[in-house]
Image (cartoon, helix red, strand yellow):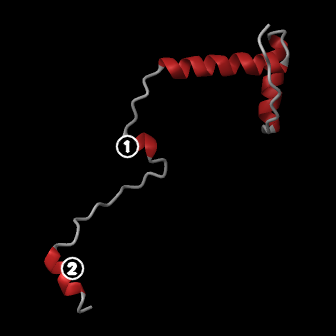
């Protein structure tokens, strides 16, 4: 028998009810249903390629603006500002 751990999570009530209905239709406990679904999800994630593009990382859809550094003459002239 494998070790188990207790985990308390907060879920929207609607999601809890969906999980409960699925567990009942599969004749298993909610815990077993959640565990099986998490296991499947994690297995699918590990089988999927992990290559990310910039759009995947930038969830706010912003674009980074890169500027050229000051030249030495610009730095010298800044002392007069």
Mark 2 and mark 1: span between their CA atoms? 33 Å
Q: Quadrant of the C terminus?
A: bottom left
Which quarter of the figure has residue 54? top left
* Residue sitting farthest toward the top: 1
Q: Is residue 50 left or right of residue 42?
A: left
Give the left or right position of residue 63, taking residue 10 as reference.
Answer: left
Vertical placement of 70 versus 9: above or below?
A: below
Residue identified by numbered label 2: 75
Residue assigned mark 1: 54
| Residue at figure coordinates x 69%, y 19% from the top left | 37
Label 2 secondary element: helix
Camera-side residue of 43 and 21 = 43
Quarter location, residue 33: top right
| Residue 12 image position (x, y, % from top left) | 78, 39
Q: Between residue 69 and residue 19, name the one nearer to us.
A: 69
Q: Is residue 62 above or below residue 14?
A: below
Residue situated furthest bottom in the rendering:
80
Percent x, y of residue 46: 52, 20
Residue at point 44%, 40% (across, down): 56
Check disc 1: other Cα within 10 Å, few if <14, some if 14-19, many if 20+.
Answer: few
């Amino acid at each position: 028998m494998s070790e188990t751990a207790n985990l308390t999570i907060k879920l929207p009530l609607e999601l809890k009810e969906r999980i409960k209905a699925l567990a009942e239709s599969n004749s298993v406990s909610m815990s077993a249903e959640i565990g099986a679904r998490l296991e499947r999800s994690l297995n699918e994630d590990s089988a999927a390629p992990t290559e990310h593009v910039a759009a995947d990382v930038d969830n706010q859809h912003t674009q980074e603006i890169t500027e050229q550094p000051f030249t030495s003459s610009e730095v010298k002239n800044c002392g007069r500002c």
